[in-house]
Image: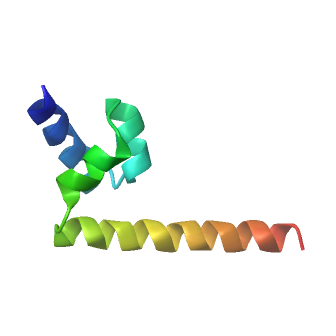
């Protein structure tokens, strides 16, 4: 069962660029489990950086909207 969830997690991360939180909620597994699945994978770290930049841009846009 966990193997199937892990395969789904890889698709959600690599294809759909989902965060650990999104994956854990979708598959109903802990964020720790998701983190262990992607530990030391360079492509996952690249997605993490991309998601971080998107969040920064969103936060900056929101702050400018209210100032």
Residue pictured at 56% horizontal, 66% vertical: 55
Nearest the camera: 42 or 57? 42
Residue 8 picture location, percent across and down: 20, 38
Q: Is residue 38 found left or right of 47 in the rendered image?
A: left
Indicate how the structure is coloured in the image.
rainbow
Residue pictured at 41% horizontal, 35% vertical: 25
Report the quarter where the C terminus lies: bottom right
Looking at the image, residue 52 lies above or below residue 16: below
Looking at the image, residue 23 lies above or below residue 13: above
Residue 6 picture location, percent across and down: 16, 40
Quarter assignment of residue 4: top left
Residue placed furthest toward the front: 32
Q: How many marks?
A: 0
Residue placed furthest toward the right: 67
Quarter assignment of residue 1: top left
Residue 18 picture location, percent across and down: 37, 51
Residue pictured at 19% horizontal, 51% vertical: 37
Q: Is residue 47 found left or right of 63 in the rendered image?
A: left
Residue 49 picture location, percent across and down: 38, 73
Q: Is residue 58 found left or right of 35 in the rendered image?
A: right
Nearest the camera: 33 or 59? 33
Looking at the image, residue 29 lies above or below residue 22: above
Residue placed furthest toward the left: 3
Residue pictured at 32% horizontal, 48% vertical: 32
């Amino acid at each position: 069962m966990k193997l199937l969830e892990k395969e789904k997690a890889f698709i959600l991360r690599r294809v759909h660029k989902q965060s650990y939180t999104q994956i854990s909620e979708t598959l109903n597994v802990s964020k720790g489990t998701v983190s262990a699945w992607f530990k030391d994978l360079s492509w996952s770290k690249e997605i993490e950086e991309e998601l971080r930049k998107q969040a920064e841009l969103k936060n900056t846009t929101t702050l400018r909207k209210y100032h």
